[in-house]
Image (cartoon, rainbow, N blue to C red):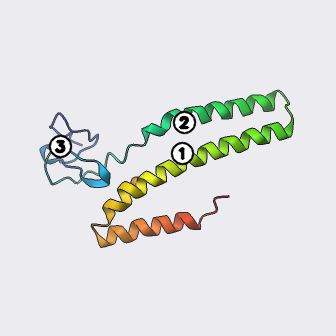
Amino acid sequence: MSKCKNPKCHCEDCQCGDDCHCGENGNECCCGDKCHCSKPHLDHSENTPRLNRIAGQIEGIKKMISEGRYCMDIIIQLRAARSAIKSVERNILKKHIQHCVAASFASENEREEKIDELIALFEQNDD
Ligand SMILES: [Cu+2]
C-alpha cells in the first residue's frame, strides 16, 4: 500500500502513488485524475460528539438498572437513546445520499447498485 506522495493528499490507503485522485464520494483529492482508491470514504466524524453523548446516556441506563430504578423510567431513557441514535442515522443517510448516491449517477451500474442498497434499507424494519 503506497501512500500518495502529494503532501496535501488526505487518502489513507492510496494505491496509486503520485497519481492519486479520489474524486469519488464527494472527496476531492488534490493530486491527478487516475485514482483507484476506495478510501477514504465519506467523513462522518461530525456525529462523534453526539455518539459520545448517546454512549453516556447508555451508561446512565445501565446505572439505573443497577440501582433498581422504576421500569418506566428506564424505558423512557431507552426511548430517548433510541431517538438520538435514529437522528445520527438520519444524518449519515442524508449525507450518503447527497454525496455517494449523487456521485454514483455518473455510472449506470453504480447508480443501480446504490439505489438497490437504499431500497433494501427501506425494506428493513425500522420501528
Ligand atoms: Cu456513502
Contact? badges 1 and 3 (CB < 8 Å): no
Q: Is mark 1 within 8 Å of ligand 1?
A: no
Q: Mark 3 vs mark 2: which is more N-terminal?
A: 3
Contact? badges 1 and 2 (CB < 8 Å): yes
**For residue 29, side relative to residue 92 (left or right):** left
The picture quadrant for ligand 1 comes to bottom left
The disc label shown at residue 88, or none: 1
Residue depicted at x 27% and y 66% = 106
Q: CA distance from mark 1 to mark 3?
A: 30 Å
Q: Secondary structure at mark 1?
A: helix
Q: Mark 1 vs mark 3: which is more N-terminal?
A: 3
Residue bearing the label numbered 2:
50
Which amino acid is tagged 1? Answer: Val
Residue bearing the label numbered 3:
30
Which amino acid is tagged 2? Answer: Arg
Q: Mark 1 vs mark 2: which is more N-terminal?
A: 2
Q: Secondary structure at mark 3?
A: loop
Q: Where is residue 77 shown, x and y percent of the image?
A: 74, 38
Residue depicted at x 55% and y 37% = 51
Which amino acid is tagged 3? Answer: Cys
Task: Say few, some or many: other residues with alpha carbon within 10 Å of mark 1 (under 14 / 14 to 19 / 20 or more).
Answer: some
Q: CA distance from mark 3 to mark 2?
A: 30 Å
